[in-house]
Image (cartoon, rainbow, N blue to C red):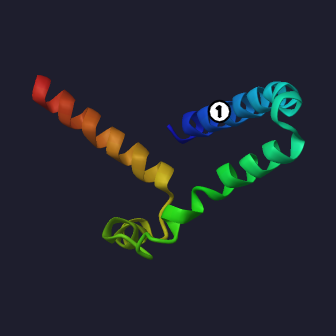
């Protein structure tokens, strides 16, 4: 699942870069290059506003390292899948 999420994120980044590259020339002719650069700066800095108002750590984030400390998350996932399959097999018989 992690690789799929990374792939989707990379594709979205590439799509955004393509759209902005294609739109830059059209918009620079209409409103000017400085206006575009200022609007891009605002869009880039926009996520920092909510991030400055979030608590340092939520209870879920604080608890999760203790749950997997010293263990590989992929091995934990494989173990959970194995247990689920064994449980499903025992319920069928």
> Is 60 placed left or right of 22 in the picture?
left
Q: Which residue: 44% across, 76% down?
A: 56
Q: 43 or 35: nearer the eye?
A: 35
Q: Which residue: 61% across, 40% down?
A: 6
Q: Which residue: 40% across, 74% down?
A: 55
> Is 21 placed left or right of 71 in the picture?
right
Can you say whether 77 is above or below 61 in the image?
A: above
Can you say whether 10 is above or below 89 in the image?
A: below
Residue 92 location (% of width, % of height): 13, 23
| Tally of numbered tags | 1
Picture quadrant of residue 61: bottom left
Which image quarter holds the C terminus? Answer: top left
Mark 1, other Cα within 10 Å: few <14 / some 14–19 / many ≥20: few
Q: Which residue: 54% across, 64% down?
A: 49
Badge 1 marks a residue whose secondary structure is helix
> Is 9 placed left or right of 57 in the picture?
right
Residue 57 location (% of width, % of height): 41, 73
Q: Which residue is mark 1?
A: 12
Residue 65 location (% of width, % of height): 43, 70
Q: Residue furthest bottom?
A: 56
Can you say whether 74 is above or below 92 in the image?
A: below
Picture quadrant of residue 64: bottom left
Q: 51 or 67: nearer the eye?
A: 51
> Is 76 placed left or right of 11 in the picture?
left
Q: 74 or 23: nearer the eye?
A: 23
Residue 22 location (% of width, % of height): 82, 24
């Amino acid at each position: 699942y992690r690789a799929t999420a990374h792939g989707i994120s990379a594709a979205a980044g590439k799509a955004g870069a393509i759209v902005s590259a294609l739109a830059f020339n059209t918009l620079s002719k209409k409103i000017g290059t400085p206006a575009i650069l200022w609007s891009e700066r605002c869009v880039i800095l926009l996520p920092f506003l909510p991030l400055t108002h979030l608590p340092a750590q939520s209870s879920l984030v604080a608890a999760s390292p203790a749950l997997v400390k010293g263990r590989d998350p992929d091995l934990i996932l494989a173990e959970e899948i194995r247990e689920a399959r064994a449980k499903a097999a025992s319920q069928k018989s």
